[in-house]
Image (tube, grey):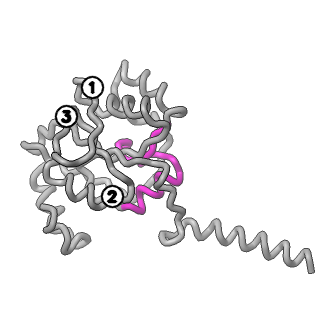
C-alpha cells in the first residue's frame, strides 16, 4: 500500500509540472521583476515620437509588472522614469545602466504593443529573452552585465548576450511606420478598449 501511495505521489508531481505549460497554470513570479519599457529611440522611420502613442496603453496593460519608462528625460508627465545618462542612441547602454542598479530586470521596447502578459511571464519563468527580439525579456546582472559591457565596445548589438526562448512572433512585431500603426488600431484582437488610450 505504501508503495502505491508513493507512486501516486510521483505521478501527481509529474502532472503538476506538465500543467505549468498551460496558460492558466503558469507560475506568476512577477513580484521579483520590474518592467522597464524603453522609450528613448529616435523614431526616425515613423516620422515622430511613436511612444507618445503607446505609453498610456502599455502602462495600463502591464500595470501589475509595476512598469518604469526608460529614456534620456522624463517624457511623460506623471509616470515613473529611469533617466539614462548616456548620450548614445543604442538600447544596450540603458540596459547596462539598469543592471548596475538592479540584479534582474524585465525589458520591453516601447513599440511592441502586441506583446501579451502571458508571454512576458513565460520569459520571466525561463529567465530568457525572446529569440526573435532581444529587446523583450529578462536580463540578469550576474549572467549578462560583463558580456554587455564588452559588446558595448564593439557592435552594440544585443543578439547572443542572453539565452533565448521562442515565443509567438506575431506578438513581437514592431510599430516602425505609420501604416503599421494604422493596422494595429484595426486589429480584431484588441476590439474595444484601445479607443480609451489613443
Residue at (59%, 70%) from the top-left corner?
Answer: 19
Rounded to the nearest whole Å, what is the CA distance between mark 2 and mark 1?
Answer: 26 Å
Residue named by callout 3: 73
Residue plotted at (40% across, 24% down): 151
Q: Find the distance from the CA under tag 3 to the CA under tag 1.
A: 9 Å
Which residue is denoted by mark 2 in the rendering?
63
Disc 1 crowd, CA 10 A, few/some/many (<14, 14-19, 20+): few
Position in image of residue 35 (x %, y %): 37, 48
Q: Is residue 180 above or below residue 160?
A: below
Q: Which residue lies furthest to the bottom in this view?
A: 1
Among the two numbered marks 2 and 3 on one chain, the one whose residue lies closer to the N terminus: 2
Earlier in the chain: of badge 2 and badge 1, it is 2
Q: Give the range drawn in magenta.
A: 117-140
Could one spot residue 96 in this view of the protein? yes
Q: In this view, does 18 lie to the left or right of 95?
A: right
**Looking at the image, which is closer to me, 81 or 23?**
81
Horizontally, residue 5 falls left or right of residue 63, namely right
Image coords of residue 41 (percent x, y): 20, 37
Provide the residue designation for mark 1. 85
Place of residue 26 in the rendered image (x, y in percent of width and height, measured from the top left): 52, 65
Q: Farthest residue toward the front?
A: 78
Residue 78 among magenta residues: no
In the depicted structure, whether residue 198 falls above or below residue 35: below
Task: Determine crowd level at label 3: few under 14, some 14-19, many 20+ residues with C-alpha closer than 10 A.
Answer: some
Seen at 26% across and 56% down, the residue is 58
Along the viewing direction, whichever of 131 and 127 lies nearer the viewer: 127
Q: Are marks 3 and 1 in contact (CB under 8 Å)?
A: no
Indicate the secondary structure of the residue bearing disc 2. helix
Distance from the alpha carbon under mark 2 to that under mark 3 = 21 Å
Amino acid at each position: 500500500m505504501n508503495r502505491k501511495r508513493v507512486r501516486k505521489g510521483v505521478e501527481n508531481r509529474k502532472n503538476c509540472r506538465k500543467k505549468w505549460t498551460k496558460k492558466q497554470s503558469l507560475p506568476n513570479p512577477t513580484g521579483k521583476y520590474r518592467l522597464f519599457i524603453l522609450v528613448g529611440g529616435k523614431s526616425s522611420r515613423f516620422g515622430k515620437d511613436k511612444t507618445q502613442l503607446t505609453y498610456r496603453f502599455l502602462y495600463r496593460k502591464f500595470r501589475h509588472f509595476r512598469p518604469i519608462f526608460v529614456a534620456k528625460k522624463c517624457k511623460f508627465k506623471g509616470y515613473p522614469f529611469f533617466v539614462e545618462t548616456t548620450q548614445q542612441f543604442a538600447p544596450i547602454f540603458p540596459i547596462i545602466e539598469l543592471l548596475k542598479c538592479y540584479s534582474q530586470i524585465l525589458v520591453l521596447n516601447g513599440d511592441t504593443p502586441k506583446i501579451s502578459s502571458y508571454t512576458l511571464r513565460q520569459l520571466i519563468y525561463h529567465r530568457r529573452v525572446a529569440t526573435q527580439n532581444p529587446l523583450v525579456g529578462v536580463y540578469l546582472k550576474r549572467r549578462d552585465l560583463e558580456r554587455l559591457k564588452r559588446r558595448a565596445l564593439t557592435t552594440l548589438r544585443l543578439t547572443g548576450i542572453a539565452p533565448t526562448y521562442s515565443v509567438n512572433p506575431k506578438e513581437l512585431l514592431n510599430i516602425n511606420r505609420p501604416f503599421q500603426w494604422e493596422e494595429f488600431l484595426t486589429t480584431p484582437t484588441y476590439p474595444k478598449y484601445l479607443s480609451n488610450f489613443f
